[in-house]
Image (tube, rainbow, N blue to C red):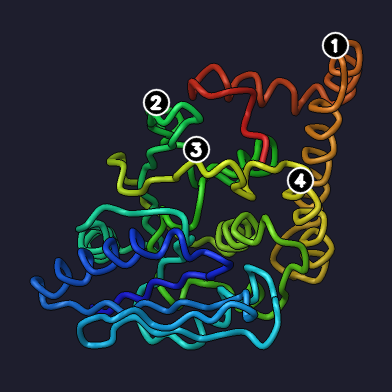
């Protein structure tokens, strides 16, 4: 088994020490089981030189974009440079446990699925950590297309996921979003629409660090990215127009809800009662906030 970890780098010098230690720990644990790790760093800030850190066997490779191309381009470029059977798209500021790749790789083979999704520890503003999937009900909705259309994305980051290379849709690789923020949402929607099978691991193997400038926390930027891929999905023959309309409706409703006062929230919710009820139910059974506003 060979695993490729692909990471876009954007002025991320301050994260590299912890990142390299994390990858080295996973390389060792994989090697002990007779497996191999390949790490592909794609430098999307070409004005800053990024050299491959000293690493045994040169398992970390660095490529540099000629100009700033964005996260989606960098992930696809890194994918094309990689050779692993299984792929993880890990952000530069996030970490996985030292033996995570061994565990997820084993599960991917045992469960005969296309993607393994691990639970996540979310760092809060005060430095504490909170487990993301806290109820059985939430675990059951992690790979549920209606939830992604009515409530929102349930995977914090691609770094939670180990994916079979062959399960990554060609449409995602060939039709790139131009606005950073939601290419992962786009990927999961395409995979679910193409009937890819998933297994959700209740154990937290991934840590989402609070940096104060995580792009995923900027809902306006993420919404702009979603509207961008909605245009692209019009040309996808296996993503239905009905689902496309529902997703557009949900993103628009949530933007209105966030930006409105009490009267505006009530008005928007009455106009989108199906979505309001879906999010209310989701909040109750998952022990999260009002849906998930990504």
Residue bearing the label numbered 2: 135
Image mark for residue 247: 4
Label located before the other in sequence (2 or 3): 2
Mark 3: few, some, or many residues within 10 Å (few <14, many ≥20)? Answer: some
Residue 98 placed where, x, y %? 22, 57
- Where disc 4 sits, the SS reads helix
- Labels 1 and 3 touching (C-beta < 8 A): no
Classify residue 230 as left or right of residue 89.
right
Q: Is residue 133 above or below residue 106?
A: above
Mark 1: few, some, or many residues within 10 Å (few <14, many ≥20)? Answer: few
Label located before the other in sequence (1 or 3): 3
- Labels 1 and 2 touching (C-beta < 8 A): no
- Labels 2 and 3 touching (C-beta < 8 A): no
Residue 42 placed where, x, y %? 52, 78
Classify residue 49 as left or right of residue 90.
right
Which quarter of the figure has residue 85?
bottom left
> Disc 2 versus disc 4: distance between alpha carbons?
25 Å
Label located before the other in sequence (2 or 4): 2
Residue 210 placed where, x, y %? 49, 41
Image mark for residue 262: 1
- Labels 2 and 4 touching (C-beta < 8 A): no
Label located before the other in sequence (1 or 2): 2
Instruction: Name the residue nearer the viewer: 194 or 248.
Output: 248
> Disc 1 versus disc 4: distance between alpha carbons?
24 Å
Classify residue 6 as left or right of residue 279.
left
Q: Nearer the viewer, mark 1 or mark 4?
A: 1
Q: Nearer the viewer, mark 2 or mark 3?
A: 2
- Where disc 3 sits, the SS reads loop
Q: Quadrant of the C terminus?
A: top right
Residue bearing the label numbered 3: 141
């Amino acid at each position: 088994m060979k695993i490729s970890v692909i990471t876009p780098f954007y002025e991320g010098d301050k994260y590299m020490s912890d990142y390299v230690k994390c990858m080295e720990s996973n390389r060792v644990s994989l090697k002990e089981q007779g497996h191999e790790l390949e790490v592909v760093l794609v430098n999307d800030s070409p004005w800053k030189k990024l050299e491959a850190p000293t690493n045994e066997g040169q398992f970390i490779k660095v490529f540099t974009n000629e100009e700033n191309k964005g996260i989606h381009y960098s992930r696809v470029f890194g994918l094309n440079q990689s050779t692993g059977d299984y792929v993880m798209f890990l952000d530069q500021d996030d970490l996985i446990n030292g033996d995570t790749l061994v565990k997820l790789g084993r599960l991917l083979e045992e469960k005969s699925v296309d993607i393994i999704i691990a639970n996540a520890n979310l760092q809060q503003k005060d430095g504490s950590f909170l487990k993301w999937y806290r109820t059985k009900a939430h675990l059951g909705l992690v790979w549920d297309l209606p939830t992604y259309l009515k409530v929102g994305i349930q995977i914090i980051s691609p770094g939670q996921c180990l994916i079979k290379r062959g399960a990554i849709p060609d449409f995602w690789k060939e039709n790139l979003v131009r606005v950073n923020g939601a290419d992962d949402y786009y990927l999961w929607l395409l995979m679910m629409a193409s009937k890819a099978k998933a297994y959700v691991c209740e154990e937290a193997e991934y840590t989402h660090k609070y940096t104060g400038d995580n792009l995923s926390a900027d809902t306006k930027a993420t919404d702009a990215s979603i509207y961008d891929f909605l245009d692209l999905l019009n040309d996808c023959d296996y993503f239905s127009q009905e689902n496309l309309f529902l997703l557009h409706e949900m993103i628009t409703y949530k933007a209105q809800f966030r930006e409105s006062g009490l009267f505006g929230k009530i008005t928007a919710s009455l106009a989108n009662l199906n979505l309001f009820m879906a999010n209310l139910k989701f909040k109750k059974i998952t022990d999260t906030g009002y849906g998930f506003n990504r």
